[in-house]
Amino acid sequence: MCTHTWWYVAPTIVNTFLEAYDFSGKKIVLFATSGGSGFGNTVKELQPSAPDAVITEGSLLNRGTKQEISEWVKSL
């Protein structure tokens, strides 16, 4: 799941998306393409919206090349 973080949390629309679907037993790996801040409290803030999923920080892909991003995705 790609997310922009503002002040170290995802925008509430991401919570709304997670609440609309059943992610039970799924692993959600976060990634972002904007550069200002890290993930901060994003996992903690999103977890209640998908309580039966495993949400983990992924990577900030700000300056990654196509090859680097492709290799990161394959490593998941």
Image (tube, rainbow, N blue to C red):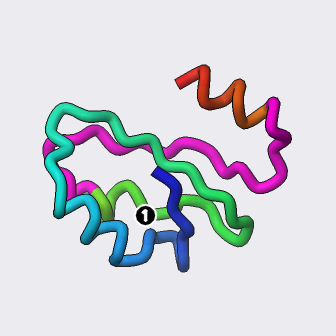
Rendering coords of residue 56 (x, y %): 42, 42
Q: Residue drawn 76% across and 55% down?
A: 62
Up/down of 44 relative to 59, above or below: below
Residue 60 seen by the camera: yes
Up/down of 26 relative to 76, above or below: below
Q: Is residue 52 left or right of residue 3?
A: left
Rendering coords of residue 60 (x, y %): 67, 51
Magenta residue check for 39 = no
Residue sitting nearer the eye, 28 or 67: 67
Residue receiving disc 1:
41
Residue lying at the far top in this picture: please name it: 75
Q: Amino acid at mark 1?
A: Asn
Residue sitting nearer the eye, 3 or 43: 3
Q: Is residue 54 left or right of residue 72?
A: left
The quadrant holding residue 65 is top right
Q: Residue drawn 54% across and 70% down?
A: 5
The quadrant holding residue 75 is top right
Q: Is residue 33 left or right of residue 12?
A: right
Residue 48 seen by the camera: no
Rendering coords of residue 61 (x, y %): 71, 49
Q: In the image, which residues are magenta?
A: 47-67
The quadrant holding residue 37 is bottom right
